[in-house]
Image: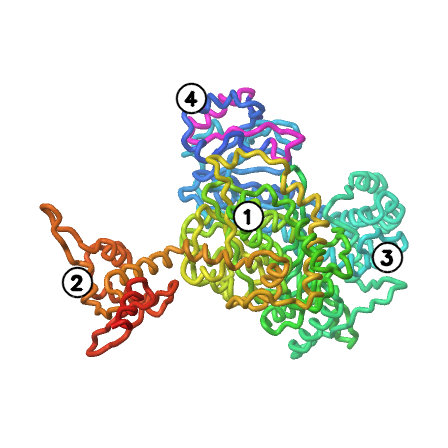
Amino acid sequence: MTNTLNNPTHVRLKLRENGYRPVPVLDPNPADKSGGKRPAIPNWIAAAKNASIDEISGWSSIKNASNTGVLTGEIIAIDIDILDTSIADAIQNSIVDELGSPLPTRFGQRPKRLLVARTDKPFKKLASPEYILPDGSKGQIEILCEGQQFVAYGVHPKTGLPYEWEGTPLHETALDDLPCVSEDFCRNILQCANDILIEQGALQKSEFDQREQIGRDIGRIEYQLPTPEIVKEALSYIPNTDLDYQSWFQMGASIHSGLGDQGFEIFDPWSQQSAKYDSRTTAKMWQHLKSEGAITIGTLFWLAHQNGWRKSNFEDDRPVILVKGGALPEIVDQSEEALIAAQIEIYQRAGQLVRPTKVRTDNDGGSSSEYIKFVPVTEDLLSELFMRSARYEKQNRDGDQVPIDIPSRISSTYLARQGGWRVPVITGVIYCPILREDGSIVDKTGYDAATGIYAAFDGDEFLPIPETVSLTDAQNAYSEVMEPFQEFPFSDTEDHTDEAVLFTALMTGFVRASLPTAPMFGFNAPVAGSGKSLLVDLISLITHGRIAAVISPGKTEEELEKRLGAALIAGDAVISLDNCNDTLQGAFLCQTVSQERVKTRILGKSVNVEVSTKTLIVATGNNISFGDDLTRRVLLVTLDPKVDRPENREFKNDAAYVVRKNRAKLVAACLTIFRGFIQAGRPQKAPILGSFPDWSKNIRSLVVWLGLPDPCISMDKVRDNDPVFQRNEALLFELDAAFGAEPFTTLQLLQKAEEREKQGESWTIKNAELHAVLAEFSGGKKDLNKISIGKALKRVVDRMIGEMVLRQVSKNGGKSSWQVTGGRRAKTDELADQIL
């Protein structure tokens, strides 16, 4: 055996000399979980590939980085991460036998080991499933290759001892001398390792966890420890006349997990039933058991149940489902009925069965927050949940009904019933109380059947709201809500439209899960660092308790559709399209904003699903613009700090801190406003905005009722900034200037645009503005023709801009005539005609 050398630079240079690519790695550090294994340089893959002798020598100046890794890609590393010596030896021997020659082998935490070979064609990392070994330890085989590295020399973070190489160490072995293997060979290695693990009694972790949970359910062990009496009763169903060591060990580990050291008083007498019993061996094994191992009391209960044990003094009230041939549809129906009756949290969303899970995110300043994410229910999990809801039995040869594990075809058949499930449908998630349509409050955690909303504010405390609320009370509450936003540089300091739109976005966010549709909100500024993204985060913090999910719009409409579709499937409550520096547009985005449901594709699958659009969609950008039909679906907030470097401004308060600290108070103020509007009879103070009738009645009118400007005024800015609108407007202006109210043909327009006049010694286009606008419609081409001009006219025909509109007044003999009405010159011509 050879251990690591004392000179890391010497080892690294020798590795480079022999064709490898060394990587400096941080030393072990108890305060850093990745210490001892994490590369010590940024962009380490590129750096390792291109490192010169001088650069490698310079790594010695990096503090606390004397471990040395080796980049994989040209080489592979077979990591046998198994703590059972016999199994690890068997897997290594199978590799060597298959290859016909030994491989350099590194040891860190024995008996774990890592074997190195060469490959001509790099591939992505391969891995076996994670296994639970008979002794309760975890095991897995990984084959590192492209974009990976392994520590070859230095100190192992767990043992505190140097890594060792069996035979010739790697730095003294030329790369070309290593045996060469292919990806297919490596896949065969994994298959062979899987076979060995299963043969030695290991279980895939998913299967093991399911068995453990079933065992805990059988023993009705949830959050309390079992009693010694129950353990002793279950153990009596497991005879110990001739058990092998592994099975005996598992019983000890299971009892120790459930009862701790007091379990020895049960385990030792049971062990004495065997002719192999040795008191010293039993006592020594027990002393080395660890309560945090994978094996739990569920193992004992599961095995005892297989042998006929039923927990005494307990009446299992789960319904019995008899599994028999030819009755699959009925069995699946019964399974679903039991699942629903057990009130297990399974829902349907976007054509998938999902369950709520808590996800923790880190906030600035070291704090963290949780949010609910709905994840798909797998077949294995569904089997477990079915077994929690019902007992599955079959008839044996004697005609007796005996318990069985649920057949997998029951779960797979139920998953295939997409569109036919009877479990509740999730329409949205809320993170604070909201008011229903009738004014009642959704204030209990969990699924609200009246709205289809999942309330996820368990543990959060919110303040009560007044029973009766006047307009004055609501206006005072509005002042309270807007307090954290006082230092933002809104562009319209006089009419306060920007503040009205911001408040509208906030109130929309509160009830978005209960509104069929709602407009999109844009946050605009002339320069970066003005506070656009922070405004979005504050809205999300108040309404949902965490900052908004951010996605990039991408470079194409197809990229935007994929990213937006994925966010909708995930159920994000707020979706922020960040840094939209190009014109934001697209058919899918328009549909998402204006339709209650859209169809999108699940990433990685050729499956289209229908998904709810009940999410608050916002976009941020510097001089952001919206194109096509999106202009009538967006309300705009504009910030203008009027300084060169807005990020250097100083503020009196940290707005995010203020919001987090006072969230309960801000939520109560918003609910107070909602209650006041409902008690006032929901006075309709604003017209209905197309595509958003419910939003108009419940949010737009509420804002105007408070005395604020109509937020839809901001849509004029959106339209004015739309490059398509600007181009259409410019064309109508030029047509009006050229022809007034006089009808014209496409040929006449072409002649007018191409008309030239002599200026000095050269000829120039007489109507340069008209020619430039038509050229823009032709993609910037200077050479105009009747076809391109005809297409330009058809794009703006019958589209009113201000008072101007272009009409097609005749189409005789295949020739179209066009006429502008409502323009400045057209009005003059019409007035002249009236006088004459």
Disc 1 marks a residue whose amino acid type is Ala
Amino acid type, mark 4: Asp
Q: Which quadrant: the N terminus?
A: top right
Determine contact: label 4, label 1, CB under 8 Å: no
The mark tally for this picture is 4
Residue 414 lies in magenta, yes or no?
no
Numbered disc in front, either 2 or 3: 2
Q: Give residue 405's position: percent from left, percent from top.
A: 71, 65
- Label 3: how many residues lie within 10 Å, few (<14), some (14-19) or many (20+)? few
The secondary structure type at the circle numbered 3 is loop
* Left/right of residue 461 with respect to residue 94 in the rendered view: right
Q: Identify the magenta region.
A: 6-35
Q: Which residue is mark 2?
A: 751
* Residue denoted by label 3: 236
- For the C terminus, the image quarter is bottom left
The residue where tag 4 is placed is 54
Q: Earlier in the sequence, mark 1 or mark 2?
A: 1
